[in-house]
Amino acid sequence: MTAHDATPTKSTSGAVASLKTAVADAYQGFFDITHNSLALLGTVLAVALITLSARADLRASAEEQLLGWLLERQEAATADAVYTAEPTAIDRVTAAQPGDLPKQQANVTYWLSRKYRVAPEPLSVLVAEAFEVGEKAKLDPTLILAVMAVESRFNPFAQSPVGAQGLMQVLTRVHTDKYNDFGGQLAAFDPVSNLRVGARVLQEAVKRAGSVEGGLRLYVGAVTTDGSWYINKVMAEHMRIQSVALGKPVQRTAPQVRPTPVVAPAPVAPGTEIEAEGPAPTTPLPAGAPLTRS
């Protein structure tokens, strides 16, 4: 081998040696820094422990902060376990924007929201549904809303002492068959389902009685009274909602249904025969009328 051929070998050996030296220096430097840092950290911890041992107030403050941090971590972990995110929950919400409704329906929604202190978004769905159902059932939608207002004040979970449930306070046990189309009796607490069933019951009552006032009497199940107290209350609210829908001033008074006295049959002595008489001076319930409150 000539001197010219040996030159590359010497250059390569020198580069490798330089690289090894650089790596060794870097390792030694890292070791020294780490060693010194650990020593410094140990010194700081030792000083901190000595200080906390000597100062009870600092020790109590440190313990309190540490305990607070641990509790926060525990609460965060518990919250993550209980409140699982559910982006599809919005699909269960019965609500809509009032601004998307036609003007008449929007006016009614905002007015009812203010009067009954109910959020306008869920009311928007109920108002729109009342107008749609009313058109199909040949009922004034403001009458359906008036019944809801008087019966439950728009509380979908309301229940009366006799078991009338939901927005329109339909006796679920009496009208069980009507809820079959909505999955069963528990649909009474679904606002839209209750509205539809209640509107159907009201429609049948009005058709049987031949008038809105008579239908309301059947709807409330008035037997021992003529139901004028209920009829007057619903009709007054009906006129107010109707005025709002038409953009007219809200009427504060409404025509009152004249109460009809209900005459109880006179007691008959045992063994006394009585002659058949004409009908009593009252408005009798039609045969087979459904009682929604008895």
Image (cartoon, grey):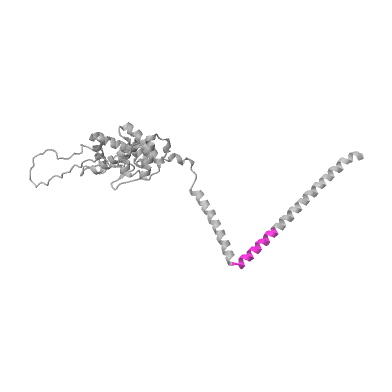
Q: In this view, does 223 lie above or below 69?
A: above
* Image spot of residue 159 (x, y percent): 32, 46
The residue shown at (89%, 39%) is 5
Compared across the picture, whether 75 is left or right of 166 comes to right
Residue 191 visible, this angle: yes
- Please say whether residue 171 is one of the residues in the magenta stretch: no
Residue 79, percent from left and from top: 50, 50
| Span shown in magenta | 38-55
Residue 1 can be seen, yes or no = no
x and y, in percent, of residue 73 in the image: 54, 54
Q: What is the quadrant of residue 207 in the picture? A: top left
The rendered magenta stretch, by its main secondary structure, is classed as helix
154 left or right, relative to 232:
right
Looking at the rendered image, the quarter that the C terminus falls into is top left
Measuring 52% from the left and 51% from the top, which residue is drawn there?
76
Q: Does the magenta stretch include residue 54?
A: yes
Viewer-closest of 77 and 256: 256
**Which quadrant of the figure has residue 11?**
top right
Quadrant containing the N terminus is: top right
Q: Position of residue 145 (x, y in %)?
A: 33, 39
Residue that extends furthest to the right in the rendered view of this protein: 2
Q: How many marks?
A: 0
Residue lying furthest front in this view? 249
From this view, report whether residue 210 is shown above or below residue 167: above
Residue 144 occupies quadrant: top left
Q: Which residue lies furthest to the bottom in this view?
A: 54
